Image (tube, grey):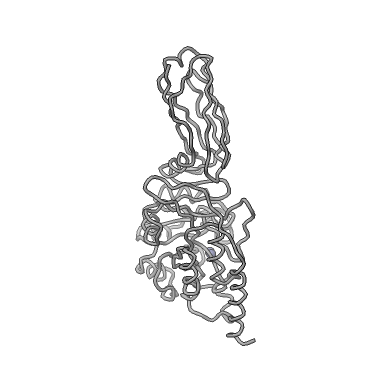
Amino acid sequence: MCRKKFWILLLLVIGIGLAHGQSRRIINIPDISGYKTLKCDFHIHTVFSDGTVWPTVRINEAWEEGLDAISITDHIEYRPHSTDVVADHNRSYEIAVPLARQKNILLVKGAEITRSMPPGHLNALFIKNANLLDRDDVFDAIKEARDQGAFLIWNHPGWKAQQPDSTLWWPEHSNLLANGLLHGIEVYNSNEYYPEALEWANEKKLTMFANTDVHGPMNVEEGQHRPMTLVFAKSRTEGGIKEALFNRRTLAYFDNTLVGQSALLEPVFFASLEYDKAPLRIANGINKVVYLRNNSDLDYELELVQPGVGFDAPERLTLKAHHVTPLSLSGNSDEIGSTREINLYYTVKNMFTGPVDNLIVTFTFKNLP
Ligand SMILES: [Zn+2]
Ligand SMILES: [Zn+2]
């Protein structure tokens, strides 16, 4: 079959797939004050590097899975299909962009600078011309990306193929950081979590990411979701995403876990919940139940930090996604009768601010006699 016929056939197959009514799932993670919570995946491959799918498939997958934005980040230096797929480094983006516009998926132009460690693999997002990143010297490639206004992410920093003994930060990364050539880091890639990267992100003020690095077709089971980066953007635009990334407003979301800064985790937690905030009337021997409704997709696993003064509260509580959970409080001494403010301190076991640190939340209620 000649090449032209092959591509026409391929597009036809994709077209037939589109004609079958697909539906878009809704990811329930709330917006927070002042920001839209965008669901994003900034590390994706296609046949234009070592992936096995056509760029438009990535747009359809993102739409079906409820994402707001993706970046196709084909390898600059590694293109095993290049005898069959003859094109320059901008082509995968150009093919995907019309469908992205049609489906209202924000498509960030990107590429993966793919070198041995150090410095390893880096994604360059918001680039203008990927062909110019094809340079002999890796630092020339990174500088070129930066000169195009790119946001640069160190990918899979603990990938065993490149860091077999331990996950190390190399002097080359300090050099990149010092020269404004490194802005973010993947704390999660595909199915690997790198707690070291979370620590570095906190120490060195890097933006955190969870990305799929998907090469084959996405295969998300019902009730599951792909690893993703939540971006807290002032607007649902590419510019909104860029501003948020450079200002570190992201959380890494994988499985039932959220990782990032408490300044973002806490508002997400409370925006997920609805409950009656009216004053309680607890006294010795008097019980009160507050019904916590969790509208998000996360099951929040709570553990009491310290016992209440004058009242009993559950030591452990799971606020199941899309369920209402009773929080039962009961007065156990006369002291509670004269307490006007009740504070409940819980750690959220599936929200991490550091490798071994969980978010601590405070529920505050007024208490009336
Ligand atoms: Zn890579
Ligand atoms: Zn990759």
Residue situated in front as seen by the camera: 178 or 234: 234
Count of marks, rendered view: 0
Q: Residue at x 56, y 30 (%)?
A: 326
Residue situated in front as seen by the camera: 15 or 105: 15
Residue situated in front as seen by the camera: 131 or 69: 69
Q: Quadrant of the N terminus?
A: bottom right
Locate residue 360 relative to residue 161 in the image: left or right.
left
In the rendered image, residue 260, in percent from the top left (x then y), is placed at 46, 46
Q: Quadrant of the C terminus?
A: top left
Q: Quadrant for residue 147, please give it.
A: bottom left
In the rendered image, residue 131, in percent from the top left (x then y), is placed at 44, 76
Q: Residue at x 41, y 47 (%)?
A: 203
In the rendered image, residue 157, in percent from the top left (x then y), is placed at 51, 57
Looking at this rendering, what residue extends furthest in the bottom direction?
Answer: 2
Say whether residue 138 is visible.
yes
Work out whether 287 lies above or below 176: above
Q: Residue at x 51, y 46 (%)?
A: 258
In the rendered image, residue 117, in percent from the top left (x then y), is placed at 50, 63
Locate residue 174 relative to residue 157 in the image: left or right.
left
Q: Residue at x 62, y 80 (%)?
A: 9
Work out whether 259 lies above or below 284: below
Say whether residue 112 is visible.
no
Q: Quadrant for residue 124, please give it.
A: bottom left
Work out whether 236 lies above or below 364: below
